[in-house]
């Protein structure tokens, strides 16, 4: 669409700008401020330069949380994206079952995050939870509060449960926007179902899948409430993801300097990764 | 390539059609000779796309048979029928190059790459795509994309027929003419059976040797463009084809002859005994001002370039005449005559088939 | 093959429903039954847990608080996002692209990063522990999303609509409220849905910014779980009740959810 140049449009954007700036810039400046200062309590602050950044970037604790975070994010992406696409492909396209599927599948998305955590906490309990009891009855020695492997299994299963539907909804939106003619042409050209997927469905879903992966990447990197309710980062530190670590430092130990420095690094990692991913995914759309 | 026969074909989109209106297609029996260029012409919703999808195998008919060279293909898939189809909105595989698009149907059929290269080169030359083979298909204009769709049909050697579903809808007007000429030329080169669906009479009449006019799920006439123009079998055809359409005037019948008021009108055919709802049909091209004939009052003159459309009032009915630019319109006491060779009697909208 | 594909969504939906079923069934069990034996459905069916929630103000106030701040947030986010999305979809202006991208980056901000600064900022301006505080905090994430969704919907409305309206003599405000907003009604519905959704499910900020007066239901649950021992039945009942508003909202927008995603631009 040809847009007209109109500098007065700034007035339309102004309310948004003021609100978001108030909410984003002031807190961000606070964080930057803390990140370069040292405090010994009593509201006395001293300039400390980039020491906090240095300390965080070289600390084993940060490396460990970042590693766990990356492992978590890539695992859930590797499961949720293909699974979501597969379910979207198998969903009906017309009739009342579409509504039934959409409504039921969207349900996990609208449950408060701590309820999700609590629900899985109960669901997985070895003695009284359906999942825990079933696994133990089947002969698995399952206890997510004691064994790190089980904790990870539960954490990932919970995230798959919670968020796969988002990928399904997005992929489905992409699929239903493909005109019937494409399928008919492919039928006439003798294309196999794999070829239909590879050359029609996947290219048409690319845009929505980009959104899905970006959203899932950002949200899984920011995840706090669900794991904190489910495992509280434990057993030990085995499921302490970045957010959980950050909150432990900031609100638990009130180490404002390191927490602020870590916040900034954390935010930058997300921004940078999202930007690189976005640039790669949209690279060949320009020609 | 094949002769296509539709035998006793009916189709409804409902599971249990009850009334006559539930049928999208009512009772069809058509025989299409091998290698012909056919057009299915009719207004939107007349069932022509339904018929096309039945032939291609995208739909299975509720009743009747479809035969290719005398063999039933009614229950075969589009692939088994060896049909190619070009759709209203261009379908190209966006991520592939033009070359890969053209090669796609062959690759799906496991044809070897050398033969593919040779076929694609041939087809690209025919469809003027040679210079763009290495471009991404998504970057082409609408007419280029339609050429790719067409090329995907032409590239196959096993094609029984190529079907076109209003293929020029999204093409720019100045390119429509070119692409139509291209289609006509390709037909004479490859002599495939081609079936072309459209609601545009110019497209149908210029493309096809045989035009099938459809209305409300029924075939109203099958004929050459000349037949449709000179001898419409149904008042719908007279009205739908030609611009302006045929004049249709209610008349009285006496002893097989037509009368408008008290004047007898000479016609090409005679009315069958006991007809009701008789009408006279004559095209504006075959009405002229004469020194004697039926008295009329001129109500409107429309100058449309190379000719004039004159509207006159004949006993309360409006009649249109087509006149050359240089012909003059009588100032008063205007009289018109119908050319008897092209004036016919219709009863209940159908042509009375008894020759004089 | 196509004939059996219904199995995949069916199995998936069963997987989704199992934990929910467990929560709901637990909410109808007595504490004794929960802790004492493993039962697939309530043997000793009770509504006691729900009675507690509906009679105890600390519980039901939580619901009221949540609904208040979610509503404020949704209305506020959509109201300011509307003109901004219109500007992005119709005009070019200095820094428009950078501004749009900057807005989206806020959607990426980890809530954990902002928890403490928000606490200090809102305490400083004196709105700590009010519904407004939570609503404002959530706008940081919801405004970018609302602008993004609305911009997608607005861009699919041809500009000729605006021009025709001006030719017909509409002033801009009249055009915007009487013609444009009804035209993109579906988009507003979708944007409001996503604002509702995020604000309803988020807890970290909501918990940090409230103490008593505006405490959300979800936070009440966490407090109860730790303070009064393990009252699992009560917890399950409260959890079940938090699912209901979401389910109702989804039902109303079911036909637009997929569309809203498809129209947003990347």
Image (cartoon, rainbow, N blue to C red):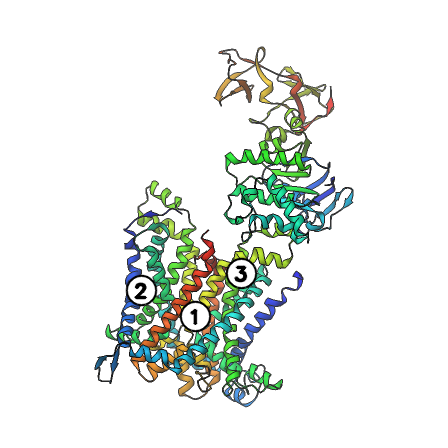
Evaluate whether label 2 is on the same chain as label 3: yes
* Measured Cα–Cα span from mark 2 to mark 1: 19 Å
Measuring from the top left, give residue B73's x and y in whole percent: 74, 47
Sequence order check, earlier mark of 1 and 3: 3
Measuring from the top left, give residue C202's x and y in whole percent: 40, 72
Residue B182 falls in image quadrant: top right
Q: Is residue A205 left or right of residue C119?
A: right
Question: At numbered mark 1, what does the secondary structure look like: helix, strand or loop?
Answer: helix
Residue A186 position (above or below residue A71): above
Evaluate whether label 2 is on the same chain as label 1: yes
* Residue at x 43%, y 72% (from the top left corner): A221
Count of numbered circles in the view: 3
Question: At numbered mark 2, what does the secondary structure look like: helix, strand or loop?
Answer: helix
Residue C63 falls in image quadrant: bottom left
Residue at the outermost top position: B291
Q: Please tell me the numbered disc located at residue B6.
A: none
Sequence order check, earlier mark of 2 and 3: 2
Q: Chain of mark 1?
A: A
Measuring from the top left, give residue B132's x and y in whole percent: 54, 44
Residue pointed to by mark 3: A172
* Measured Cα–Cα span from mark 1 to mark 3: 20 Å
Residue pointed to by mark 1: A219
Residue pointed to by mark 2: A20
Residue C181: tell me if it is visible. yes
Contact? badges 2 and 1 (CB < 8 Å): no
* Residue at x 43%, y 62% (from the top left corner): A278
């Amino acid at each position: 669409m040809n847009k007209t140049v109109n500098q007065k449009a700034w007035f339309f954007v102004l309310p948004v700008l003021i609100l978001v700036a108030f909410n984003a810039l002031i807190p961000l400046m606070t964080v930057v401020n803390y990140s370069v200062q040292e405090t010994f309590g009593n509201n006395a602050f001293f300039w400390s330069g980039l020491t906090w950044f240095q300390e965080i970037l070289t600390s084993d604790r940060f490396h460990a949380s970042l590693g766990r975070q990356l492992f978590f994010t890539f695992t859930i992406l590797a499961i949720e994206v293909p699974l979501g696409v597969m379910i979207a492909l198998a969903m009906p396209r017309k009739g009342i079952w579409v509504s039934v599927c959409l409504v039921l599948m969207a349900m996990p998305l609208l449950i408060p995050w701590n309820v999700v955590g609590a629900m899985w906490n109960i669901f997985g309990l070895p003695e009284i939870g359906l999942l825990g009891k079933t696994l133990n009855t089947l002969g698995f020695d399952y206890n997510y509060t004691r064994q790190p492997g089980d904790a990870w299994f539960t954490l990932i299963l919970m995230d798959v449960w919670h968020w796969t539907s988002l990928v399904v909804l997005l992929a489905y939106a992409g699929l239903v926007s493909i005109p019937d003619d494409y399928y008919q042409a492919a039928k006439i050209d003798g294309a196999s179902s794999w070829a239909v997927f590879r050359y029609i469905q996947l290219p048409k879903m690319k845009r929505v899948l980009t959104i899905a992966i970006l959203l899932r990447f950002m949200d899984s990197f920011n995840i706090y409430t669900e794991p904190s309710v489910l495992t509280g980062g434990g057993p030990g530190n085995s499921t302490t993801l970045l957010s959980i670590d950050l909150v432990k430092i900031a609100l638990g130990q009130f180490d404002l300097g390191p927490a602020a420095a870590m916040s900034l690094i954390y935010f930058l990692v997300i921004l940078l990764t999202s930007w690189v991913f976005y640039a790669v995914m949209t690279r060949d759309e320009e020609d | 390539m094949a002769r296509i026969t539709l035998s006793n074909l009916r189709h409804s989109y409902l599971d249990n059609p009850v009334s006559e209106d539930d049928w999208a297609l009512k009772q069809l029996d058509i025989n299409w000779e091998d290698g012909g260029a056919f057009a299915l012409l009719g207004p939107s919703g007349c069932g022509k796309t339904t018929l096309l999808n039945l032939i291609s195998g995208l739909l299975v008919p509720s009743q009747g048979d479809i035969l290719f060279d005398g063999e039933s293909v009614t229950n075969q898939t589009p692939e088994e029928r060896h049909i190619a189809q070009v759709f209203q909105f261009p379908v190209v595989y966006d991520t592939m190059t033009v070359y890969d698009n053209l090669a796609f149907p062959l690759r799906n059929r496991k044809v070897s790459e050398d033969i593919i290269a040779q076929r694609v080169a041939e087809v690209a030359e025919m469809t003027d795509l040679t210079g763009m083979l290495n471009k991404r298909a998504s970057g082409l204009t609408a007419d280029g994309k339609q050429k790719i769709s067409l090329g995907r049909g032409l590239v196959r050697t096993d094609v029984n027929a190529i079907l076109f579903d209003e293929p020029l809808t999204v093409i720019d007007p100045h390119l429509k003419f070119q692409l139509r000429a291209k289609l006509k030329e390709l037909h004479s080169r490859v002599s495939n059976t081609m079936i072309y669906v459209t609601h545009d009479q110019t497209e149908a009449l210029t493309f096809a040797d045989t035009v099938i006019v459809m209305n409300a799920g029924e075939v109203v006439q099958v004929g050459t463009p000349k037949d449709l123009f000179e001898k419409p079998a149904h008042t719908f055809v007279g009205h739908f084809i030609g611009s302006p359409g045929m004049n249709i005037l209610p008349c009285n019948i006496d002893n097989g002859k037509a009368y408008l008021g008290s004047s007898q009108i000479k016609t090409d055919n005679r009315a069958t005994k006991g007809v009701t709802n008789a009408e006279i049909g004559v095209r504006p091209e075959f009405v002229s001002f004469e020194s004697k004939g039926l008295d009329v009052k001129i109500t409107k003159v429309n100058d449309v370039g190379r000719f004039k459309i004159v509207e006159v009032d004949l006993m309360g009915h409006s009649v249109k005449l087509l006149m050359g630019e240089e012909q003059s319109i009588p100032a008063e006491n205007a009289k018109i005559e119908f050319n008897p060779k092209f004036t016919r009697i219709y009863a209940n909208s159908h042509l009375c088939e008894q020759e004089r | 093959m196509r004939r059996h594909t219904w199995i995949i969504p069916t199995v998936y939906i069963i997987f989704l429903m199992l934990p929910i079923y467990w929560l709901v069934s637990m909410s109808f069990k007595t504490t004794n039954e929960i802790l004492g034996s493993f039962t697939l459905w309530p043997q000793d069916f009770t509504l006691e847990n729900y009675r507690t929630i509906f009679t105890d103000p600390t519980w039901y106030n939580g619901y009221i608080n949540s609904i208040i701040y979610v509503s404020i947030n949704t209305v506020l986010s959509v109201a300011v996002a509307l003109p901004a999305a219109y500007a992005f979809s119709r005009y070019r202006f200095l820094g428009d692209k950078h501004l749009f991208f900057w807005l989206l980056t806020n959607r990426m901000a980890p809530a954990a990063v902002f928890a403490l600064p928000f606490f200090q900022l809102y305490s400083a301006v004196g709105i700590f522990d009010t519904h407004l505080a939570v609503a404002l905090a959530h706008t940081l994430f919801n405004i970018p999303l609302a602008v993004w969704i609305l911009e997608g919907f607005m861009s699919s409305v041809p500009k000729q609509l605006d021009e025709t309206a001006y030719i017909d003599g509409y002033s801009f405000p009249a055009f915007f409220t009487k013609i444009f907003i009804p035209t993109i009604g579906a988009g507003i519905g979708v944007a409001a849905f996503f604002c509702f959704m995020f604000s309803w499910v988020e807890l970290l900020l909501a918990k940090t910014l409230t103490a008593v007066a505006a405490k959300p239901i979800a936070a009440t649950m966490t407090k109860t779980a730790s303070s009064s021992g393990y009252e699992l039945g009560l917890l399950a009942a409260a959890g079940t009740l938090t699912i209901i508003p979401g389910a109702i909202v989804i039902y109303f927008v079911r036909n637009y959810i997929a569309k809203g995603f498809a129209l947003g631009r990347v």
